[in-house]
Amino acid sequence: MLEYKWFPEGVVDESFRNIRIDVFVKEQGVCEEAEFDDFDMQVPHLVIFLDGEAVATGRIIPYGEDTVKLGRIAVKKDKRGLGLGEKIVLELLRKAKEDGAMKVVIGSQSHAVGFYEKCGFSLVGTPEYLEENIPHFDMQLTF
């Protein structure tokens, strides 16, 4: 059974911290100090639980008057291929739109560009850049 749980701003829960440690720190080599930032206390986070296990996460950051930025989207390695990435992105987009966002931006890891295009995002046109030594492209979606 899938359960979607929103953690409001000001709440840093072990469920999303552990997913991000597994995916970004252990799997991708991001240093833990860089992975966790001030936004963790300031913005809402979403966690998807599958049969009680936290398996996917993401967050929404205000990014201007009518724009938000999605970030820290991660799915546990052993749960990939189940459609959880799309589910987390679509729920983040639903919440962003419900809260009044007109545009959503994301810094996509280069290997995930096709995935985000399937979710409705388009490349912005900026060149590829490195973030924590991982190639990224900027993408956006307009409601």
Image (tube, grey):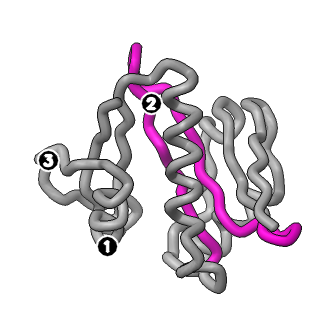
At horizontal 35% and vertical 39% (from top left) the residue drawn is: 105
Q: CA distance from mark 2 to mark 3?
A: 18 Å
* Mark found first going from the N terminus, 2 or 1: 2
Spot occupied by residue 32 in the image (x, y as percentages of width and height): 62, 63
Where does the magenta region start and end? 50-76
Q: Give yes or no for residue 67 being in the magenta stretch.
A: yes
In screen coordinates, is 105 left or right of 30?
Answer: left
Q: Is residue 51 above or below residue 35?
A: below
Q: Give yes or no for residue 60 being in the magenta stretch.
A: yes
Spot occupied by residue 15 in the image (x, y as percentages of width and height): 80, 59
| Residue occupying the far right of the picture | 52
Q: Nearer the viewer, mark 2 or mark 3?
A: 2
Q: Residues within 10 Å of mark 2 (few under 14, many from 20)?
A: many
Q: Residues within 10 Å of mark 1 (few under 14, many from 20)?
A: few
| Residue occupying the far front of the picture | 1
Residue 34 appears anywhere in the view: no
Spot occupied by residue 86 in the image (x, y as percentages of width and height): 50, 61
* Residue carrying label 2: 68
Q: Main secondary structure of the magenta part?
A: strand
| Three-letter code for the amino acid on which mark 3 is drawn | Thr
In screen coordinates, is 10 left or right of 33?
Answer: right
At horizontal 39% and vertical 25% (from top left) the residue drawn is: 67
Q: Which mark is residue 102?
A: none
* Residue carrying label 3: 126
Spot occupied by residue 112 in the image (x, y as percentages of width and height): 35, 68
